[in-house]
Image (tube, grey):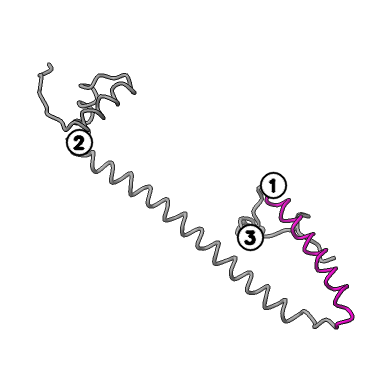
Amino acid sequence: MKVETKVYLPADLAKALHQLSIRTRRPKSEIVRAALASFMSPDGAERTEAALLRRLDRMNKHMERLEREAQVGNEALAIFIRTWLGATPVVSAADEPATRALGQKRYGNFIQALNRRLSSGASLSDQAFEPGGLGLNGDEPTGR
């Protein structure tokens, strides 16, 4: 059984209700009924809160993973730089042009390997944490 009820709405809310009714092709009474049922539902707020908490939990886990990946990347870079600085000899002025040319070639190889890896969707950081570790697959730049 339905009971007719008069409700006074502010003009902007009445206009929004009218536009929603036209857009969804639903009667205004159906829209108001659904809104009231949702508003008055005792667990409506709890469902919304639970959904928000689940979403925040997923976002938190994602942020923790990003933080961990950044930490691993920073540590790897720091170790590489320390090793490189300790192992790289000082180049004489006479050898500098040849050394610079070799460095540019190696950098080009590195960029090509990076491009191949990014294009394939493979992630070295994902492989680093898989059982079996980091077997070389040919995408890595060579030292020559």
Of circles 3 and 2, which is in front? Answer: 2
Q: Which residue is mark 1?
A: 120
Q: Earlier in the sequence, mark 3 or mark 2?
A: 2
Is 97 within the magenta? yes
Front tag of 1 and 3: 1
- Residue beneath label 3, please? 128
Where residue 85 appears, as percent x and y from the top left, is 72, 79
State the residue at coordinates (78%, 55%): 138
Within 10 angstroms of label 1, few (less than 14), some, or many (20 or more) residues?
A: few
Q: Amino acid at mark 3?
A: Ala
- Please tell me which residue lies in front, 128 or 59: 59
Where is residue 142? Give x, y as percent: 81, 62
The region drawn magenta spans 93-120
In the depicted structure, whether residue 56 falls above or below residue 142? above
First in sequence, mark 1 or 3: give its number.
Answer: 1
Helix, strand or loop status at disc 3: helix
